[in-house]
Image: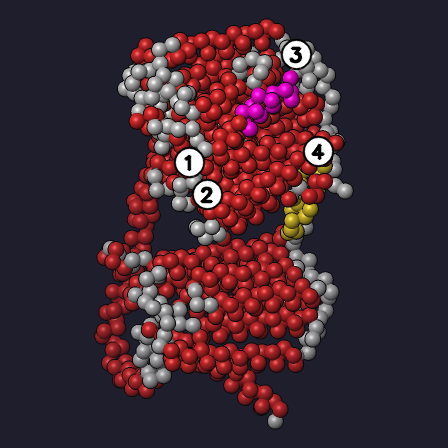
Amino acid sequence: MNPASHLWVIPALPLLAAALGALTPRGGRRLAAGAAIAAMAGALIASCFALHAALAAPAAHLTCNFEWFRLGGGAVRLGWLLDPLNGLMCVMVSLVSLLIFIFSLGYMDEDENFTRFFCFLALFAAAMLGVVVSNSLLLLFVSWELVGLSSYLLIGFWFHKPSAAAAAKKAFIVTRIGDLGFFIGLVWLYDSTGSLLLYDGGRGILEAHALAGLAAPALAGGLAASTAIGLLIFCGAAGKSGQFPLHVWLPDAMEGPTPVSALIHAATMVAAGVFLMARVFPLMAADQALASAPLHALTVVAGIGAVTALMGAAIAVAQDDLKKVLAFSTVSQLGYMMLAVGVGSWVAAIFHLLTHAFFKALLFLGAGSVIHATHHEQDIRRLGGLGGRMRVTFATFAVGMMALAGVPFVFSGFWSKESILHAAMEWEVSRLPLWAGLAGVVLTAYYMTRLTFEVFAGRPRSHAAEQARESPAVITVPLLVLAAGAILLGFLGTPAWPWLQSQLTGAAVPSGPLIESPVLTAVSVILVALGLGAGWYLYGRRPRSDAGAADPVAAAFPAVFAFLAARMKLDELYALTVGRLSSALSWLADFLDRRVWDGAIRLLARLGELAGLMNGEADRDGLNAGFDAVSEGFRRAGRAYSRAQSGDAQGYLRALAVGFVVLVVLVLMGCSR
Amino acid sequence: MSAALAIVALATLGSAAAAMLGRSLLRSIFMLAVSWAGVAAFYMWAGAQFVAFAQVLIYLGAISMVALFAVLLTRQSRDEASPPPAALRRAILAVVAAAGVAAVLLWAVAHSPLAVSGSLAPATSVRQLGFDLMGRHAAALLVVGVLLTIALLGAVVLAADGAQERPGDEP
Amino acid sequence: MNALQLCLAFSSLLFAVGLAGALARSNAIIVLLGLELMLNAANINFIAFWRFSPSSAPATGVIFVLFSIAVAAAEAAVGMALVIAIYRHQKTIRLPDATDLKG
């Protein structure tokens, strides 16, 4: 029996819960939340079975394809795919979703639209799992857009706040720009291969036959079609995963409720882009064999990833909003993942994706716990001193922070980041991604230390922070589970025991020494220590005394800090360039409409007017007298008929129906006679 | 084959009847959407996939949305209920007229020599349809295009608020 | 009855349902939607004849239905616009009240 044929159960369960939630009236809070959580638990169990089945044959891509509909000669086919990559993603998504659903029980407890929230969350989980399990890029694209839709709904969940409504719109539109490229890529791919199935027993687009066709230098300048298609697909991935220059929506998306930020904008949805890149990696890498090509798709991916990783980390240094820091840190970490894909190690990217999902969800939920306890105070200058008041939150947040910063050996983030840096070091094309990655490491350690000291150390700097109490168990238990994951997950893929790597690639990866390149590891450990030390020196040694005090870095380098705090002015740049361009285009269209077309139409109208004038003259003199007599006759007849004109439209229709029946009966009688 | 047709037909007729009987406008539109989906299913059954596609796109996608908008825009309409005797009279007349039409039609269907030829649906690919539309039926296609354009313009003019018309815009 | 007659009977009944709705309801929107049902019934006939009695030009029935659907869309757009115009004019969409054309 083919386990892939049952894979649809995984997204179907949360979809059912979403439908149930949509039908539940507002009062049915328990029903909606219970259904969503039960569905996620079911999906988690199913995912575990799926992973088990996938690990039994890691190299085989188990598929279950079926025909959706047939249009003329061609059929559109969809399918499910099961391999270790899918299985791991399924387990990760459903586990993190489950924990965040439980967390939401506590966090959203006071919200009056609690039912709607769970409906949207379940819809999101269904769409995300759909992305993961589909074997057809078409099905993947449909789920992908559903993910975008539910993200829009959830960012704008507090739509009465204008900023949230604007952020939702921005997220939707910016990701749509990327998706347009993705869609064009799909159409191109379908045109050149005749299929959108990933694996189809030799005919799928990720299998040797199709790839060989795509990798031929078919375009101008010796580019392969697969390069262009890969880059178009990468557009979609860059939009979803917040890669430069489409990252601008991700920080704004923090207007949504914190569980949403944790689920969508840290752990799962933004990882979809990286997952997509890993999924279609054979396509992305198809042009590597083409040495003469001026550009390889993966080179672009690596470059964008490196820029994003460095830029996100630099901007995060100067943010004052608790969630914005984490948002830019997410942008930066996603950049690392793309960098890993770009340098050819999608396995390292997925490893980092899995560990990042846990520790970033942990950090966001920790932030959510803080925000919940302080009644929505998110400004880190006005927090402080929470370490003593919220011990569980502090301890788990510290675990997440150290995992993100890459504190050596114990935390998962260290291992996954090491594997990315190692891959970047072995890349032959350029060393720049490695330098960007190393610079990002020191910045990451620094801004996370700053954040932790500002929030948890010192003494409370606002009334809300003084009143903070530890959150209830429904919030802290998911934190503890995630913290355990943030530590233990690293041991799945250490160089000494490369279980994850061998499962994902389906080939045994020999276990090497625990530390693959001592120099690189030593450098990155030193950089982490440097970042931690700088953070401690600036923010931990003498914690900020009151909310108004200037940031020590801002005091030393005001211009740099302001530039970073304004997110490198990229939003303003877009307003100046893209916004100006579209205004200019619409002005041009308006001008054409008003001046050019309108003039032509006016001319025609004048001609018509002239003709009418001449007609009128002829009428008045010659024809009027005769018509007067005839029209008197019409008037009399009209009066007689007008009695039938009741003005009741349905009466007319009824008369028509009755008349039809009577006519038919008359005709039949005539025939039979 | 016939069982599938019977199920589709019963569902379509049932939801259409429910739509026509229902008191709530929104529910009626929803039931009509179900009914239209049933008609699309019939087209699928008959092998006319592209027509089913058009049916879903236009009826489920466009017309039901237009109807919903009309309902929303005319929300504050005065109370729907007629004075009972008039409404009852109209309903009785309507059912009688409709039953008469149905009886005539069914009689005609039952007594006509309608032979079934060909057990398979005629093969019509989308490519063929495209060639036909652009070739033999190009004139009709153009006429329909003009009709749709004018109908849409007319709909905009009708629905537009008359108060904002500028005097110089009259042709 | 053969399959073609079954299809025709189905379309006749659908036509009658639409007609009854169009005649009985006072709400203009429902009346319009009843008309749409009647159009649908006619389209079913086209498809049924196309399916069961092949002609020399294989796509005729399908093309007819496509045109019919296009016209129905135009009709729905104009109809709904009329409903809105009537509503703006009279603050009601009850057809029995819209008797301005009374002679």
Residue A564, visible in the rendered structure? no
In the rendered structure, which amino acid carries the disc numbered 4?
A: His
Badge 1 density bin: few <14, some 14–19, many ≥20, Cα 10 Å: many
User: Residue at the spot x=77%, y=42% of the render?
Assistant: A1
Badge 4 density bin: few <14, some 14–19, many ≥20, Cα 10 Å: some
Label 3 marks which chain's residue? A
Q: Earlier in the sequence, mark 1 or mark 3?
A: 1
Helix, strand or loop: magenta stretch: helix
In the rendered structure, which amino acid carries the disc numbered 2?
A: Phe
Question: Who is closer to the viewer here, A509 or A639?
Answer: A509
Residue underneath mark 2: A117
Label 4 marks which chain's residue? A
Residue underneath mark 3: A514
In the image, which residues are magenta? A481-494
Label 1 marks which chain's residue? A
Please state which of the two labelled residues, at mark 4 or mark 1, is closer to the viewer. Answer: 4
Check if mark 4 and mark 3 are on a common chain: yes
In the rendered structure, which amino acid carries the disc numbered 1?
A: Gly
Residue underneath mark 4: A52
Residue underneath mark 1: A256
